[in-house]
Image (cartoon, rainbow, N blue to C red):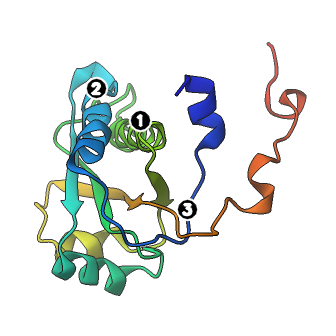
Amino acid sequence: MEFTEVVKNRYSCKKYDGKQISAEQLDAVLQAGRLAPTAKNLQGQRIYVVQSAEGLAKIDELTPCRYGAPTVLVVAFDKNSVFVYPGEEANSGVEDASIVATHMMLAATNTGVDSCWLNFFDPAAVAKAFDLPENEQVLMLLDLGFAAEGFAPLPNHTSRKPLEETVKYL
């Protein structure tokens, strides 16, 4: 798929048919995350693939937003593997993990997989439920699967403000 089409076609799927994505599709998504740029190329992202019934049940206890997706990626970052910005008040962890997650969402669309970025959950509860290392911070969950029959993007999906409202040349 041409890149502009990938960007236009990607939407937040809120109802999945439950059919599992293929290993090839999952690998394409994970490889896109691996190739994403990170500050100083530290690659501090940590991606956990949840597909087991037990794991998905944990996700369901933590958020109402799995929407029946058969695969959920827990996207985290290693707090010890970040670039600290001048002034030492901020670091690249959230940004790096966000770039990785965005690459994976776009790769999912490119391979025919629907996705939804989830942030309606307690990150500490997710880390505890999956016994993640203390040095890692969960950023988001990424639902992956195929839209249920008849499900379509929300009506406002294509509504965008004109560039003049969001971009200013200095």
Quarter of the figure with residue 35: top left
Q: Secondary structure at mark 3?
A: loop
Position in image of residue 143 (x %, y %): 40, 61
Q: Nearest to the eye among marks 3 and 2: give it.
A: 3
Look at 27% across and 72% down and name the residue there: 126
Task: Check the picture and name the quadrant holding the C terminus.
Answer: top right
Of 159 and 128, which appears nearest the observer? 159
Q: Nearest to the eye among marks 1 and 3: give it.
A: 3
Establish if 148 lies above or below 74: below
Establish if 93 lies above or below 136: above
Q: Which residue is mark 3?
A: 13
Residues at circles 2 and 1 in contact by the CB criterion of under 8 Å: yes
In the rendered structure, find residue 103 and report the number of the disc placed on it. Answer: 1
Gap in angstroms between the C-alphas marked 3 and 2: 24 Å
Q: Amino acid at mark 1?
A: His
Q: Residues within 10 Å of mark 1 (few under 14, many from 20)?
A: many
Position in image of residue 132 (x %, y %): 13, 64
In the rendered structure, find residue 169 and report the number of the disc placed on it. Answer: none
Which comes sooner in the sequence, label 3 or label 2? 3
In the rendered structure, find residue 35 and report the number of the disc placed on it. Answer: 2
In the displayed structure image, the side of residue 78 where residue 8 appears, left or right? right
Gap in angstroms between the C-alphas marked 1 and 3: 17 Å
Which comes sooner in the sequence, label 1 or label 3? 3
